[in-house]
């Protein structure tokens, strides 16, 4: 996983071309676009000090601008990608459109602003909630 500042001895990935390196945000697919220098591998001292929560742990989306974990997880990335002839540390392609910058996704996300309701029904085919199709057709449940 990664969080905080770059680990000692770790190389920070270069800034994305066309994106400010100091802006954080979330892409449409849930990937995180983080400041490139704000990531570092967690240490055992971080774990022992409970400096970070499990919701702070990030996993890389393969590409040229990501840091891969230097542990079993990083080795698993390399092993899985090798099956398709890819090397996680050599993702540059001659055709720019074929190169992926990569990104990060949170390992665990805690849901927020949730609600629930207990519903009862009298018939097994009774609709219990409004579906997206109902909304499109403006039909009540």
Image (spheres, rainbow, N blue to C red):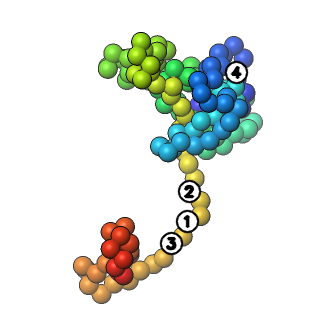
Looking at the image, is 92 positioned above or below residue 31?
Answer: above
Q: Residue 106's x, y, as percent?
A: 55, 40
Label 1, residues with CA under 10 Å away: few <14, some 14-19, many ≥20: few
The answer to whether mark 4 and mark 1 are in CB contact below 8 A is no
Q: Residue at 66% across / 38% down in the picture?
A: 24
Badge number at residue 7: 4
Q: Quadrant for residue 35, please give it.
A: top right
Q: Please tell me how many numbered marks the rendered image carries.
A: 4
Q: Residue at 56% across / 19% down in the picture?
A: 70
Let me know if residue 25 appears in the view.
yes
Badge number at residue 3: none
Badge number at residue 114: 1
C-alpha gap between disc 3 and disc 2: 13 Å
Let me know if residue 43 appears in the view.
no
Comes first in the chain, label 3 or label 2:
2
Q: Residue 137's x, y, as percent?
A: 32, 74
Circle 3 is placed at which residue position?
Answer: 116
Q: Residue 12's x, y, as percent?
A: 65, 19
Residue in front for this viewpoint, 43 or 7: 7
The answer to whether mark 2 and mark 1 are in CB contact below 8 A is yes
C-alpha gap between disc 2 and disc 4: 29 Å
Circle 2 is placed at which residue position?
Answer: 111
- The local secondary structure at tag 2 comes to loop
Residue sitting at the far front:
18
Looking at the image, is 56 positioned above or below residue 40?
Answer: below
Looking at the image, is 128 positioned above or below residue 73?
Answer: below
C-alpha gap between disc 4 and disc 3: 42 Å
Residue in front for this viewpoint, 140 or 83: 140
Label 4, residues with CA under 10 Å away: few <14, some 14-19, many ≥20: some
Residue in front for this viewpoint, 71 or 139: 139
Q: Residue 51's x, y, as percent?
A: 73, 38
The answer to whether mark 1 and mark 3 are in CB contact below 8 A is yes
């Amino acid at each position: 996983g990664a969080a905080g500042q770059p680990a000692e001895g770790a190389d920070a990935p270069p800034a994305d071309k066309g994106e400010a390196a100091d802006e954080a945000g979330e892409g449409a697919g849930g990937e995180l676009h983080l400041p490139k220098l704000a990531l570092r591998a967690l240490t055992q001292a971080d774990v022992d000090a409970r400096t970070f929560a499990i919701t702070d742990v990030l996993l890389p989306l393969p590409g040229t601008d990501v840091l891969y974990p230097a542990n079993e997880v990083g080795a698993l990335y390399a092993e899985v990608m090798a099956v398709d002839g890819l090397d996680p540390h050599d993702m540059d392609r001659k055709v720019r459109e074929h190169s992926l910058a990569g990104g990060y996704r949170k390992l665990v996300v805690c849901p927020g602003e949730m609600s629930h309701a207990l519903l009862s029904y009298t018939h097994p085919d009774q609709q219990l909630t409004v579906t997206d199709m109902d909304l499109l057709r403006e039909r009540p449940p």
